[in-house]
Image: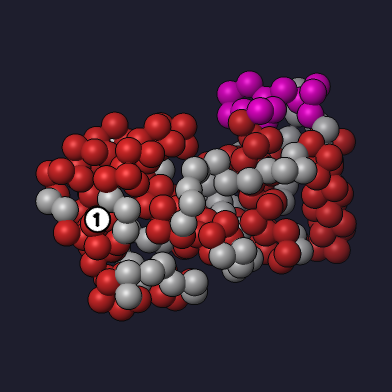
Amino acid sequence: MANPPFPRETLKAKKTRALEICTLLDQDYPQAECALHHNTPLQLLIATILSAQCTDRRVNLVTPDLFQRFPDAHAFAETKAEELEEAIRSTGFFRNKAKNIRACCKLLIERHQGEVPDSMEALTALPGVGRKTANVVLGNAFGLNVGVVVDTHVTRLSRRLALSKQTDPVKIEQDLMKLIPQERWTLFSHQLIHHGRQVCSARTPQCNACNLRRLCPGKIG
């Protein structure tokens, strides 16, 4: 069962609680990292585009052969649409993803010599790349804490933990950036994702086994 609602918190009190949550997450998930397998920034960029409406596990099944067939931006940009579509078919929405990947890689060649840029502005200017994807790449490929990745797990847990009342990922990210120290932004999102998968699931959260229970007011809305 969820705990009764917390009394109204000041921003200072919420920051203090958020830091306690971080400490407990460190205990449970000290080595949390990106679940998408990759060796280069380009591989992570492609894998993240493929992960839209698809599980990381499925993407990781597809990418080993994909990256062997298409080792760089030129290979992705020059392939026929049908060939790329067939290679990524099992990730879902494959036509749109293939279109974005080819267009993205063409722009990487035109503007960045085929390399993935390390700025939010340059990344979000690429086809198929929004703020979430850019945050994944910046945080995990370049070690830059520019923002917080907000996926479905982070959205759910941010609301259950009363770190945000918002439903829009951009607004949730803004709330989290006010509460979590910047140097933790990438790690924090990984830890919440791990916790959401292992303990705080959408349908059957294991509250009795949750290390965060005393700091959690329960699901909002």
Residue under the point 27% across and 39% down: 88
- The amino acid pointed to by label 1 is Phe
Image position of 81 (left or right of 14): left
Report if residue 207 is visible in the image.
yes
**Quick check: 205 above or below 79?**
above
Quick one: quadrant of the N terminus? Answer: top right
Chief SS of the magenta region: loop
Image position of 126 (left or right of 194): left
Q: Nearer the viewer, residue 79 or 195?
A: 79
Q: Is residue 207 magenta?
A: yes
Q: Position of residue 195 (x, y in %)?
A: 68, 35
Q: Position of residue 52 (x, y in %)?
A: 39, 44
At numbered mark 1, what does the secondary structure look like: helix, strand or loop? Answer: helix
Residue under label 1, please give it: 76
Which image quadrant is residue 27 in?
top right
Which color mode does the image show?
A: secondary structure
Which image quadrant is residue 31 in?
top right
Q: Nearer the viewer, residue 200 or 68?
A: 68
Q: Is residue 179 magenta?
A: no
Q: List the single residue furthest toward the bottom.
A: 111
Q: Nearer the viewer, residue 6 or 205?
A: 205
The local crowd at label 1, few if under 14, some if 14 to 19, many if 20 or more residues have their Cα within 10 Å, is many
Image position of 181 (left or right of 186): right
Report if residue 174 is visible in the image.
no
Image position of 109 (left or right of 115): left
Residue under the point 38% across and 39% down: 64
- Magenta residue span: 198-210
Q: Position of residue 218 (x, y in %)?
A: 73, 35
